[in-house]
Image (spheres, grey):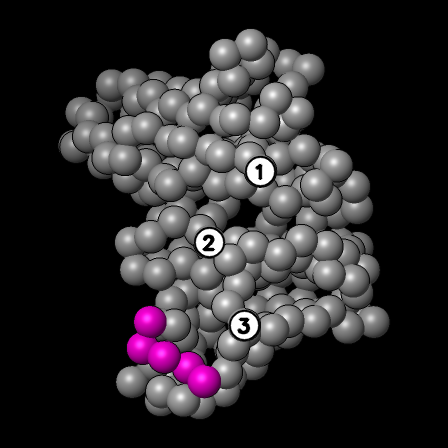
Amino acid sequence: DSGVTQTPKHLITATGQRVTLRCSPRSGDLSVYWYQQSLDQGLQFLIQYYNGEERAKGNILERFSAQQFPDLHSELNLSSLELGDSALYFCASSATGGNQPQHFGDGTRLSIL
Amino acid sequence: GENVEQHPSTLSVQEGDSAVIKCTYSDSASNYFPWYKQELGKRPQLIIDIRSNVGEKKDQRIAVTLNKTAKHFSLHITETQPEDSAVYFCAASRASTGNQFYFGTGTSLTVIP
């Protein structure tokens, strides 16, 4: 158990819909990262938040948005869903400061029908 | 920005043999290099990491070496076992970019019993 909690574990929805993925970081971690992993693909960095503020942005589509709340949990919102958005979405967290390992949650598997 | 290349993309070894996975990075300011193991459908798990002030680090059958001059680092697994079969990802980061990880594309390791 990494201490990072992601809900839901599985999500099945249709094209054009909107979903929200939730992540609770490890106790004490201020940074949250979101990644997308399509089938047999690598880890695509989407976005990072640190103590409520956006810190870094990767290949995140305009249809996707995220935020980190005062209690440090984070949500990733995906809208106008397309078939290609089907993937495993991971959240990771790390402690304050640089050069720290990121600890991954178990992911949310999103299937678009 | 940083670019991390990882080779090989697939690797098959006989049980008991050694496996080596190599990564190169482009940003000479990168100073933290973690390795993750991801089993099918599971979350990436940190298996070992190295900081730039160290040239080599070992943890039982796993070792990582870093050559800062050549900007490459390698994962060495000795006495491989079937349970070592997984996808391995290398990453590079530096504190000044907020601990954002730049991941390699992954190596699928198969250990043949």
Residue B38 relative to residue B56: left or right: left
Question: How far apart are labels 2 and 3 at the CA level?
Answer: 15 Å
Which residues fall within the magenta stretch? A80-84
Name the secondary structure under disc 3.
Answer: loop
Q: Residues within 10 Å of mark 2 (few under 14, many from 20)?
A: some
Quadrant in which residue B57 is drawn: top right
- Across and down, in percent, residue B46 comes to 53, 40
Q: Is residue B61 visible?
A: no
- Across and down, in percent, residue B40 comes to 32, 53
For the residues bearing labels 1 and 3, Cβ distance under 8 angstroms: no
To which residue does mark 2 refer?
A44
Q: Chain of mark 2?
A: A
Q: Is residue B40 above or below residue A15?
A: above
Do marks 2 and 3 share a subunit?
yes
Name the secondary structure under disc 2.
Answer: strand
Q: Residue at x 75, y 47 (%)?
A: A95
- Across and down, in percent, residue A3 comes to 64, 58
Q: Chain of mark 3?
A: A
Q: Is residue B104 above or below residue A56?
A: above
Q: Earlier in the sequence, mark 2 or mark 3?
A: 2
To which residue does mark 3 refer?
A62
For the residues bearing labels 2 and 1, Cβ distance under 8 angstroms: no
Name the secondary structure under disc 1.
Answer: loop
Amino acid type, callout 3: Glu
Quadrant in which residue B88 is drawn: top left
Q: Nearer the viewer, residue A52 or B2?
A: B2
Q: Residue at x 73, y 61 (%)?
A: A54
Q: Residue at x 30, y 22 (%)?
A: B19
